[in-house]
Amino acid sequence: MLAFTDTGEKKERVLIRGLDEADLGGVRELRSAVRWAADPRAFELLRGTRDARWAVAEAPGGPVAGMVGAVPLGGIGILCHLAVHEEYRGGGIGTALSRWAVAYLRGRGVRVVRLYSTRQAEGLYRSLGFRPVCRRTVYRREGGERIPDPAPLCGYRVEALLMGDLPELYGVDAWSYGGDRSHLLFATLRHHPGLGLVARDRTGRIKGYLIRSRSGRSVRIGPFLAENSRVARHLLRAALAQSGESPVEASVPEPPGSPAHALFRSFGFAAGSERLRMELGDGPAPGGGLEQYATTAYLAT
């Protein structure tokens, strides 16, 4: 696939191709040039996720002019980490990379492609047929603040998430989310061992879970799902207690009326930046299950 970019004097051909090991240095330089705001470890984590694929835009002479990731999760696919070097913007590279990612995901049987857009990129995605769905709000809480005491959680228990819990957790998550995030969940727990919590009812069935990850001094929450707000409150309190003095962040991808917003505000979180969630195609039918209170820090999920 070829894209064209206007340098001001002439149009140059830019090759869109799969990323290989020799491109990693150029990818790091691109990330630095575009001042990537995402967790720098997210790219490395996702490279090891099953069936994830990456493409780069190669300019004449070899520099990496752009990149994109495509991660299939069953019926849902994620278009992520789209970046184009400022020198090459406006020439169709972002469109070509996005089309590459969509084509790969469609080829894997994905029914809906999901992403989170900045304001600057919204027009690009709309031109490809993506539609806005809702906004993701990032909440942040500084460490050292008092943690509210929740009402007793009768009939439930909150405990550490163990590797033996994963088969049941994968099933509960797929039912609730509508896609297969098992490889993403496993990779997150492998990179951040001991940072998962699970809530069970009297019968021992999973009724909620919360996974944390560390980024520098900060702790990020997600995925975070629960049967109801009472279970969610106890999971969040336990996570904050274990996070100590560290600042804590959570990304909430829900409409303003979602109980997740009220939950995080009640624990002293302040709303910050927002991004627009956009989708292409028909999403999977809601399967019920647990309600999502926060997403993973690594993907637009």
Image (cartoon, rainbow, N blue to C red):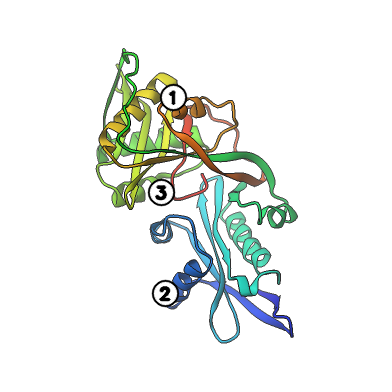
Q: Quadrant of the N terminus?
A: bottom right
Between 104 and 79, the residue placed more toward the observer is 79
The x and y percentages for residue 29 are 47, 73
Q: Of helix, strand and loop, which one carries label 2?
A: helix
Q: Position of residue 295 (x, y in %)?
A: 47, 40
- Neighbour class for label 2 at 10 Å: few (<14), some, many (≥20)? few
Disc 1 vs disc 2: which is toward the camera?
1
Secondary element under disc 1, as helix, strand or loop, is helix
Whether residue 291 is situated above or below residue 37 in the rendered picture: above
Q: Is residue 252 above or below residue 121?
A: above
Determine which residue is flagged by label 1. Answer: 266
The residue labelled by disc 3 is: 184
Q: Against 268, is 123 above or below?
A: below
Residue 153, x across and y down, in percent: 32, 15
State if disc 3 and disc 1 touch (CB < 8 Å): no
Residue under the point 29% across and 48% down: 192
Image quarter of residue 170:
top left
The label shown at residue 41 is none
Mark 3 residue element: helix
